[in-house]
Amino acid sequence: MVSMILIGLGSNLTTPQYNSSKKILEAAIEQLANYQVEIIAVSNFYQTEPVPKSDQPWFVNAVISVKTNHEALELLKILHEIELNLGRTRRQRWEARIIDLDLLSYNDEIFPDQETWLKKSKEIMSDQPVIPHGRMHERDFVLIPLCDIHKEWQHPVLHKTAQNLLNEHSGNAIVRLL
């Protein structure tokens, strides 16, 4: 099994400082170095329609793999801090956002445990984080960029590679190379 830390990035709003969603994602990637997070690989950037479908602007998405000595929940706090640094405010679920950083996978860790993960990953809203990300295996905007950099990565609960998950996924969301 290929073990790694994966982070999903998304943006569909801009700021006066960053005039494109791609620039916001690049700024988030740069900020990770300030927190002792080393970038190992960066996927291509993709333009993707919102999920669930809505009339909000399309997203720019990417996936990165990183190396760090931070524990998983500590890394998650760092991701939220970077979101705040870049101007993200959280008001409602699935709203347009300046930046969204998701901890997709932390090595082979399953948090809180496999039984709870299986239950919580099916919930639309969970009151606690789940690792690996509870819906990453259902999202083309995660699986396609993940396959750019690590198609051999294996989901620690589902025991399928990223490429197999993408091949089996029947998503109909539009994902275009930027």
Image (cartoon, rainbow, N blue to C red):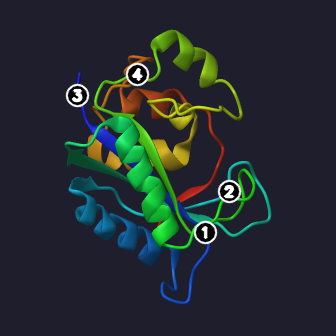
Q: Which residue is mark 4?
A: 110
Q: CA distance from mark 3 to mark 4?
A: 15 Å
**Residue at x 65%, y 31% (from the top left corner):** 126
- What residue did someone put label 3 on? 2
The residue at the point 41 percent across, 27 percent down is 164
Q: Residue at x 43, y 17 (%)?
A: 157
- How far apart are the two marked residues, 1 and 3, measured between alpha carbons? 31 Å
Reply above or below: 144 against 127. Answer: below
- In this rendering, the answer to whether 128 lies above or below 6 is above
**Residue 92 spot, x, y in % from top left:** 75, 54
Q: Which residue is mark 1?
A: 12
Query: Is residue 46 at least partly visible in the picture?
Result: no
Which amino acid does the dot numbered 1 rest on?
Asn
Residue flagged by tag 2: what amino acid is it?
Pro
Which residue is at the far top?
115
**Between marks 4 and 2 in the image, the one whose residue lies nearer the viewer:** 4
Give the CA distance from mark 3 to mark 2. 30 Å
Q: Quadrant of residue 71?
A: top left
Query: In 3D space, how far apart are the residues under numbered discs 1 and 4 (Cα atoms)?
Result: 29 Å
Q: Secondary structure at mark 3?
A: loop
Task: Report whether 71 appears left or right of 118.
Answer: left
Name the N-terminal-most of marks 1 and 4. 1
